[in-house]
Image (spheres, grey):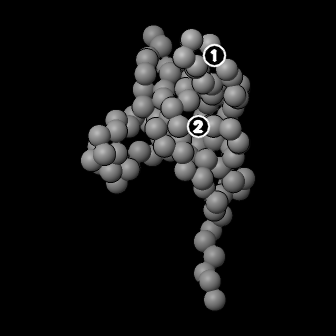
Amino acid sequence: MKIKTDIEFISFSDGICDIYSIDEEGNITYKFRGLGFANRVLGFKRYFTAAANQVKTDRVIRIPNVYGIDNHDIVEIRGNGKYDIELIQNIFDSNPQCIDLTLRQLEVIR
């Protein structure tokens, strides 16, 4: 018999972000605007695994399960800055189902 894990309920209430891509000519194509997110802990394992693969990791956020997001899309967190998506992980044991985005900071808004 398989032991069921507890289901985590997520509210995505830590902030608002926009996700978009930029083509070779610099044109911006918005994929999602005003998407809520929840901050996640950037743990030692994730940080040092990324460092071993020569990937800089600055932040992890959890967003609702949406389609069409790709690695190296840009996430702009309102009032915080712009980030590049380094890793996308689907989370199946939460309600609603979510995606964890591992981010590398591109610029800071002051």
Q: Position of residue 31 (x, y in %)?
A: 69, 28
Residue type for callout 2: Asp
Residue type for callout 1: Ile
Disc 1 or 2, which lies upstream in sequence?
1
Residue 63 location, quadrant: top right
Left or right placement of residue 71 versus residue 27 in this view: left
Between 57 and 53, the one nearer to me in the picture: 53
Residue placed under numbered mark 1 in the picture: 28
Q: Position of residue 17 (x, y in %)?
A: 62, 27
Between 84 and 61, the one nearer to me in the picture: 84
Distance of label 1 from label 2 (alpha carbons):
14 Å
Q: Position of residue 101 (x, y in %)?
A: 53, 41
Residue placed under numbered mark 2 in the picture: 70
Residue 68 location, quadrant: top right
Residue at the front extreme of this rendering: 24
**What residue appears at the point 62 percent right and 83 percent down from the top-left corner?**
2
Quadrant in which the C terminus appears: top left
Q: Is the C-beta separation of discs 1 and 2 under 8 Å?
A: no
- Observer able to see residue 44: no
Q: Position of residue 54 (x, y in %)?
A: 29, 40
User: Label 2 neighbourhood size at 10 Å, few (<14), some (14-19), many (20+)?
Assistant: some
Numbered marks: total: 2
| Res 40 label | none
